[in-house]
Amino acid sequence: MLKTNDIQINKIELASTEISAILEDSEVQPEQYAFLKGRLTTYKLYINSEYTLKSEIQYDKPSKLLSIGINIIIPDQYIPDDPNKVNEILMDPINTFQIFYDAQNEIYNRKH
């Protein structure tokens, strides 16, 4: 099960906001890691094409711990003035990633 270990939201440059998240999953088998690593490169297709995405995946084989670092830069023009909607917009890429990750695990489990 994917857990959010850390989330930071920072204003960068003059017109962008960066969301950095570290997500972890335990008890990931080596074959499952190889499958997920290949699939995670397609995540960028699920977020707004105007966002910039950088990700890093690490796997510790002895502990079976998968760690995924995600950095998403959102141009401020996509962030509403309504304070109630700001959190929703900023968290949407992370929530979308969690749904995407769960779906990839479902696909893996059906194949194995």
Image (spheres, rainbow, N blue to C red):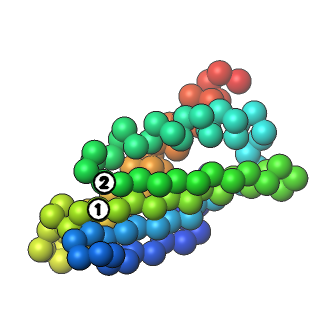
Q: Quadrant of residue 108?
A: top right
The first of marks 1 and 2 along the sequence is 2
The percent position of residue 61, horizontal first and vertical second, equals 83, 49
Left or right: 50 as drawn, with respect to 37: left
Q: Residues within 10 Å of mark 2 (few under 14, many from 20)?
A: some
Q: Residue furthest right?
A: 62
**Left or right of 103: which side holds 84?**
left
Residue 51, label in figure: 2
> Hey, what amino acid is under mark 1?
Ile
Q: CA distance from mark 1 to mark 2?
A: 5 Å
Q: Is residue 17 left or right of residue 99?
A: left
Q: Judge whether residue 52 can be spotted in this image.
A: yes
* Quadrant occupied by the C terminus: top right
Residue 95 place in picture, x, y as percent: 40, 55
Is any atom of residue 95 visible in this view?
Answer: no
Up-down relation of residue 58 to residue 29 (above or below): below
Dividing the picture into quadrants, the one containing residue 12 is bottom left
In the displayed image of the protein, which residue is found farthest to the top?
111
User: Which residue is labeled 1 in the image?
Assistant: 74
Q: Nearer the viewer, residue 72 or 46?
A: 72
Label 1 close to label 2 by CB (< 8 Å): yes
The label shown at residue 100 is none
Q: Amino acid at mark 2?
A: Tyr
Mark 1 residue crowding within 10 angstroms, few (<14) / some (14–19) / many (20+): many
Taking the spot 53% from the left edge, 41% from the top edge, the residue there is 40
For the point 77% across and 41% down, the residue is 29
